[in-house]
Image (tube, rainbow, N blue to C red):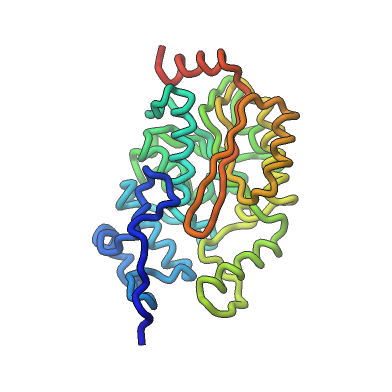
Amino acid sequence: MPQRKKEHPEEKVKLHPRNLHRERYDFKLLTESYPALVPFVHLNRFQDESIDFANPEAVKMLNKALLKQYYKIETWDIPADYLCPPIPGRADYLHYIADLLADANQGKIPTGKKINCLDIGVGANCVYPIIGNATYGWSFIGSDVDAIALESANHIIESNPFLKKAVVCRLQPNPKNILQGILGKDEYIDVVICNPPFHDSWEAAQASTLRKLNHLNKKKVTQPTRNFGGQAGELWCEGGEKVFITDLILESKAFATSCFWFSTLVSNADHLKSLYHVLADAGALDVKTIPMGQGHKTSRILAWSFLKPKQQEIWRKMRWQGK
């Protein structure tokens, strides 16, 4: 006997107001746009159309449909076991970054290819550049330490003509570096975005995956198949999120006048206090913490700049306003 139909909010109110995914997934629209999704859509226990979010193939098909319907991506795929990110959360980050740029530009979001973004850890999926370019027309540099991931990202770029002049991928030759070896001496970046590896070990990443699968399946799961995938470098690094972001802050000093805003997601709020100290010691002049929320999950963006007010004004006039 089916459970009583659950009442759902019309909108995911925690998502950014400009996020195209605030409403519940319209599976009729998505399956019309991408028929290959049809076999994965079913009525859940509340008699709503949904997919099995514990099934990696179903999640990938949903992403293909979302990217085609909302971002005009005709061809998109990733290698087996690579990270298949949730599209609404990735879009949210970029909308808040657009607001961050607008705050420094008299309330107007700077758009077009003149805005150059660096996506640290672009991954095999290339999702941040896709959404950022489709939504705001921004150009992107995507960096990664994984050559297979970059091969996949480049295939996505080559397969979708509007991305070919907007996105370039670069291999990080030294896994111990983040910005060094990626950015050129005379290269200017308007904003850096980063979704850092969260866990401090493979075992911790596996344990987290099991907890998520148990929640999705509502039963005990012992095989840690990742519903959203993920290679080691995407999920964990030595010292976890806090150490990675600390290293990013320390490296960002060397690019203090060639980047307007550096930013990163911070999943664990307990890390903020330590990171604020690192930023103060590094000489960051402007630090912002932007709350984000998707469903039951809360996160935040940590952003910082080394530019003085006069430098910000010159940057804005020269790069964003074309004066």
Q: Is residue 43 visible?
A: no
Between residues 189 and 44, which one lies in front from this camera angle? 44
In the image as oriented, which residue stretches furthest toward the bottom?
1
Between residues 198 and 24, which one lies in front from this camera angle? 24
Q: Quadrant of residue 199?
A: bottom right
User: Image height check: is 106 above or below 136?
Assistant: above
In the image, is 289 to the left or to the right of 87? right
Q: How many marks?
A: 0
**Residue located at (45% from left, 46% from top):** 92
User: Image height check: is 309 above or below 39?
Assistant: above
Q: Position of residue 275 (x, y in %)?
A: 70, 39
Q: Position of residue 287 (x, y in %)?
A: 61, 31
Q: Position of residue 8 (x, y in %)?
A: 36, 65
Q: Position of residue 142 (x, y in %)?
A: 52, 39
Between residues 133 and 156, which one lies in front from this camera angle? 133
User: Image height check: is 47 above or below 281?
Assistant: below
**Residue located at (70% from left, 36% from top):** 276
User: Image height check: is 146 above or below 179?
Assistant: below
**Residue located at (58% from left, 22% from top):** 258
**Residue located at (65% from left, 48% from top):** 269
Q: Is residue 220 visible?
A: yes
Q: Quadrant of the N terminus?
A: bottom left
In the image, is 89 to the left or to the right of 37? right
Q: Quadrant of the C terminus?
A: top left
